[in-house]
Image: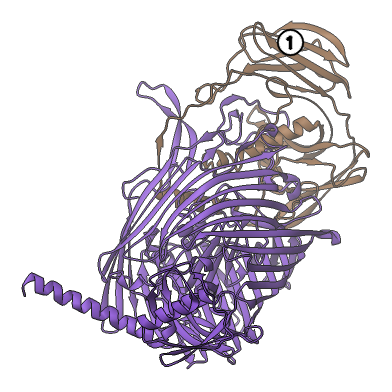
Chain colours: A purple, B brown
Amino acid sequence: MPEILNHIYKSTIIILLILLVNTKLNGQNVLYTYVQLSKSTASTEEFLLEIEDQTDVIFSYSDKLCFEESKELPKKNGTIKEILNALFEGCPSEYIVRGSKIIIKPYEGKPLKFTIKGYVLDKATKEALIQSNIYEEELLLGTVSNNFGFYSITLPQGFVELSGSYVGYKDLHQYINLTKDTIINFLMEPSGELGEVAVVGNRVPGRVKSTRIGSVDVPIEQIKNMPVYLGEVDIIKSIQLLPGVQSGSEGFSELYVRGGGPDQNLILLDDVPIYNVSHLFGFFSIFNADAVNNVQIIKGGFPARYGGRLSSVVDVRMYDGNQEEHKGTVSIGLLSSRVAAEGPLIKDKSSFSVSFRRTYFDIFTSIWQLSNADKSRYYFYDFNTKLNYKLSDKDRLYFSAYLGKDQYGAQFNEQYIDVANKTKSSERQIKTYDENEIGWRNYVGAVRWNHIFGSKMFANTTLTFSDYRFFIEEKLNYFSDGNWSVASQNYYSGIRDFSAKIDVDYVPSPKHYIRFGGSAIMHTFYPGIDVRLSGVNSDAAPVDTTFGGTEMLRNEFRLYVEDDLYISSRLKMNIGGHFSLFQAENDKYYWSAEPRLSARYLVNDNFSIKAAYSHMTQYMHLLRTATVAMPTDLWLPVSENIAPMRAAQTALGFEYEIGKGFNLTFEAYYKKMYDILAYKETAGYFDFASDWQSKLTSGNGQSAGFEVLLHRKVGNLAGWFGYTYAKSTNQFDELNNGKEFPANFDRTHDVSIYTSYKFSKKTDMAVTWTFGTGNPITLPETKYYSPDLPTATKPDGITYNQYINERNSYRMPNFHRLDIGFNFRKEKERGSRLWSIGVMNAYGRQNPFFLYFSDSEGESGDVQRSLKQFSLFPIPIPYARYTINF
Amino acid sequence: MINKLLYILSAVILLMSCEKDIDLDINDQTDKLVMYAFIYQDSALDLSISKSQSILAVENYALVDKGRFELQINDQAQGKYILPSDTIWSSWSEFSFEEKDQIKIKAFELEGDTVESTTFIPHRIPIVQLDTNTVVKNVTDVGNVDMLRSVIKFQEPVNEVNYYQLHIVREGWGKIGEKDYYTRKVIDFEDDDDVFTHGEQSGSLLPGIDFQGLFTDELINGKLYELEVNIPRDNLLFAFEKEDKIKITYYLYHHTYDYYSYLRSIILAGGYEGFYRRLPIFEPVKIHSNVEGGLGLVSGMSFDSDSLVFNK
């Protein structure tokens, strides 16, 4: 075909396609026909005539309408409806469409309004799409779906075009003649990013943009694509790559948000707080990505519905389960394997989701130790499940649970013991071992009941249970003088919560989205309990003795109310308050009333300025064992001597929407923290000779900085660039001679780049690069004589004392690392398979984990002393994982 | 047990790690004068003066070339003295001290720094009664163990904040061949008494650091208190077969706040036999000092004792 003909052919096809699309739109309603007027000032009648001339539309109108001799329109183009709205701006009218005829008549009395409600769901799986936008494009009114996918919006009667938008999904438009309260479920289709054309549709109008500042939603698909240690997808490590969030030590799943400590993060799994998110001493987090539907982190501008921690909220939502068909996943990695399944239980009524992950260190070690008398093993597992049942169109019931455990066990001291065989009056020989187990576990459960009251109110009532335990168990055999006895001893610490809460969403009008609710939590802190059981096999009755610490029962009550409201068409605010009450010992109560305020001013549809102010209070804190996460870390409540920690944060920023799912945000913040806790300089965790309260000292902290995030959530080229400049300091009267010092893990500069590129449907690649200023560290500067004391023996190897001049006055070398991963997919007859391979620390950067002084012998035999750096992952570490979806 | 946990962590870390020298500019601190003195009633003054060194130095301390010191007892100046330059310890028998004496020592290097410290000699707290009997206790990892239960009764003074240490010393006499045999050893005991551990998170499977018998009067202020400790039989009779006599002496030390804090801080800094220093994932502990302008410790102390003698 000659080139010119080829060009004409393609142009014709495109024009026909456009016309088809246009026809489809017009076919919905002539009110949405696009017109271009010749002038912007004319009489009302002249404008109507020109529209009739340009289109096939015929107007019929009442003489009660406000006709003007000279009317100036704000713009000369737009849909017929937009032009009519502008023409009759002074006297609101309604439009009735009969074929190509439009009847215009003035409202009699106040225009009626009706409510549209429903759920926003994935079309294929019926999974709730959380925080999706629902908006009326012309009126520029909108709302967002809640954590269950529910939305409600009230609009004037008449023709409306209601659109649904969710990142990674095609926009969905619904044309409705709104004459009564209506239920519309948005069943959204994934966009399938290949080619990108599919996602360039209507943009979410700026006016429906959230007032939230300091919060980031990370699509779970982006998290799953990241390069990861040993192939273990890790939600917390993904969050660490966001600006404002520091990771602490390399490789650990801890979060340090805007100068706060790791205990200042409220980590929620389906509304239930998780107190220890670590596996394997914090190298991995407990969240199994197969079970997770949505992840949101809030670093500032906290909505009133959240409370209890100073620095952040990490809200993780599990999958409800595919309601249409049964699906499954099997994934095999170097460290662990996972299986997941989901599907309907009763068609259109109930579905389930279940996933399980377990490591296999212990299987390998048991093979190696077959011939050994002494054996040891380590494993961790996660089990997630969620069931839902639709009781009626207005009622839905959910049950979710998480069980996870880390356990190290050892079997030693093998003995053969002769015991009397009572039935045969003889002796038999049995083999015994002494055993001990160390581990920690989380058991979490929640039952939820969603109920829709009328068309504007959604209530979620939840009962939750959360139980975190660290435990040591020991069983020993004693055999002497023919008597065999077994004694066991257990130690445990932890925290157990029972809570009841209700959260209500009330949407009285498009200008208000009110949330209110309350909760009551019964905490039981276990600061360290010993249980001894002795004489199991001896003639004497077993003796069960419980001693050590005492259980601490503490009650906590919370109430909140917030309103997401439009002050004007450009100014939207979220105003709220959070009230809490905490019962310390001896009937002493602490309370707090926390104002929460955030505002968004829309400069234009794509650009908004945001500001926020929030107060937070925290009634419990983590007594840390070391500078890295340890299972022995202990949650303890406030007391008569330990006041609650409090924080006030102010943030200011802007958001620019470059394209759908492609945003640039800038935020500057200032956070002041009061009564934060630290160990005294002459105390430590293992100092059990002192009451824990006397080991702590309280002080203040502050953090200021700015964060830049360029985030592209859709497209073949996706990912983010994040930069943080921050300065976080602490001041304690009893530390560092009262002088201010850098907070632990304060990083001046922090850069993170995450990029994923989809070469084809089969292949994609992901790269992360992180850079951070070295962490602050306290180093001794001098050493001095340490004499033998008249009443004590010095610890072994201690020949001198060290003098510390200033706390955190040095910095470790800068940190940077490159991780690369590839995913290779292949469609199979039933489902698909995925190979994930990659390498962490691709160029083998030796990042510091800690620094220490060491003596070594020089070439000439003289002793030299130097500062050494200890690196945890000094070489490139490859990973591979094989996944089958069916 | 906690050691096991820490060693597992160490093993995990060591499996994946490596180390290398790095250059970091350590602030040059001027060497500080370091002074130590532990003063008893009816005893001479033993004084140590030295100088600190850079943390990167191989030597742990330096000698003071031209050192001097002045002593005041109960605000009475006792004169100015020249310190030896070839050793850090010197003994001054011309001084003697009494209970409750207020002591001030000022030391300086000619054309150098001056340091100063004040202390007092706490009054003796008498042991009113010592009772012992034998018991059998179940001990983790060991099983049933014969122990000598010892009850040390003393009157804790009211309206004072007092710091104590229970110190138990075993001495043995005998003959090996023709040679006289004598041994002296500080012995470990089970410090289950509430005065030693009243932290709520304590537990026998998660043992804390051994503070070598230190305690305060926080729980027992003003009481006639019976302090109970158990000494494992093996700690008492480990060499009894070659001995004719052993003597167990119970020392009840009455310390100053400074001595108590210094001893606690060096024990904490050392951690589990120096584990903290070898795996520095713990915040460093600041060593207590009561020497103004320098480092070290000057403290008085007193004690009362009672003993048991076992003859073969």
Amino acid residing under circle 1: Phe
- Place of residue A40 in the rendered image (x, y in percent of width and height, measured from the top left): 44, 68
Dot 1: chain letter: B
**Which residue lies under the disc numbered 1?**
B69
Q: Nearer the viewer, residue A192 or B299?
A: A192
Q: Is residue A138 left or right of residue A459?
A: left
Number of numbered labels in the structure image: 1
Task: Please tell me whether mark 1 sits on a helix, a strand or a loop.
Answer: strand
- Place of residue A18 in the rendered image (x, y in percent of width and height, measured from the top left): 28, 78
Mark 1 surroundings: few (<14), some (14-19) or many (≥20) residues within 10 A = some
Name which residue lies at 64% across and 87% down: A108
Residue A258 showing in the rendered view: yes
Q: Quadrant of the N terminus of chain A?
A: bottom left
Q: In the rendered image of this protein, does residue A184 appear above or below residue A208?
A: below
Q: Quadrant of residue A106?
A: bottom right
Q: Quadrant of the C terminus of chain A?
A: bottom left
| Residue extending farthest front | A69
Residue A130 showing in the rendered view: no
